[in-house]
Image: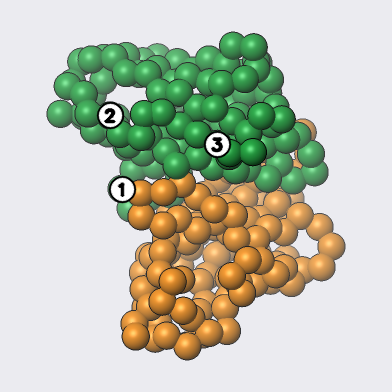
Amino acid sequence: DTGVSQNPRHKITKRGQNVTFRCDPISEHNRLYWYRQTLGQGPEFLTYFQNEAQLEKSRLLSDRFSAERPKGSFSTLEIQRTEQGDSAMYLCASSLTGIDYEQYFGPGTRLTVT
Amino acid sequence: AQSVTQLGSHVSVSEGALVLLRCNYSSSVPPYLFWYVQYPNQGLQLLLKYTTGATLVKGINGFEAEFKKSETSFHLTKPSAHMSDAAEYFCAVSARGNQGGKLIFGQGTELSVKP
């Protein structure tokens, strides 16, 4: 098992462009989470999936953000019309459903919007 | 709503000294509790967790934490700091039961270790 992987690791884009990130969870994990972390802060929850169903979305997730998990495997997070305030580390985590939902994190995708 | 407060955004200790990182939570029902560590430009790694049972929890790299319901605290300790412990530490909570899963994090504590 190679753990949670995220691609790309770094993305620099100009304001107004669209970007898409990919997360590949640990293979047997049915839950997948997205978090956003800005400099000097703890991660903030964005959304999570159980299999292919998106079960919860944070109010932080504006209409410009969309996430999918087709077939319950990998997930994509798309940001449309990026703004400078979107600059952050985007973290993906996966878990099994169970008593404590222990989450395993990927290395993150660092987005810089210029 | 659940929340987590980590007292002290930066803690500095000498190598070999006690490490104490403080975490208090707010929740109507005792949640699941976690400590994660993050090294620069990396994701988060789980140090330890409390779900049920013994309130003193031992984790990796010599860290431990004690759940104190009466104080709504889950402080992280290590008897003797090592240079490799320098990192950012996050306390987190999640709700019990099926509605659980998402983690609510504190703002983090940066630990520096002086030689």
Q: Which amino acid does label 1 sit on?
A: Leu
Dot 1: chain letter: A
Mark 1 Cα-neighbour bin, 10 Å: few <14, some 14–19, many ≥20: few
Q: What residue type is labelled 2?
A: Lys
Dot 3: chain letter: A
Q: Colour of chain A?
A: green
Q: Is residue A80 above or below residue A46?
A: above
Q: What element carries label 1?
A: loop
In the picture, the disc for residue A4 is 3
Residue A70 position in % (x across, y down): 59, 11
Question: The chain coloured orange carries which letter?
Answer: B
Asked whether residue B37 appears in the rendered view, the answer is: yes
Question: Which residue appears at 39% of the width and 86% of the height?
Answer: B14
Q: In this view, does B42 lie to the left or right of B66?
A: left
Q: Mark 2 points at which residue?
A: A11
Q: Determine the CA span between mark 1 and mark 2.
A: 16 Å
- Foreground residue among A110 and B25: A110
Q: Is residue A42 left or right of residue B95?
A: left
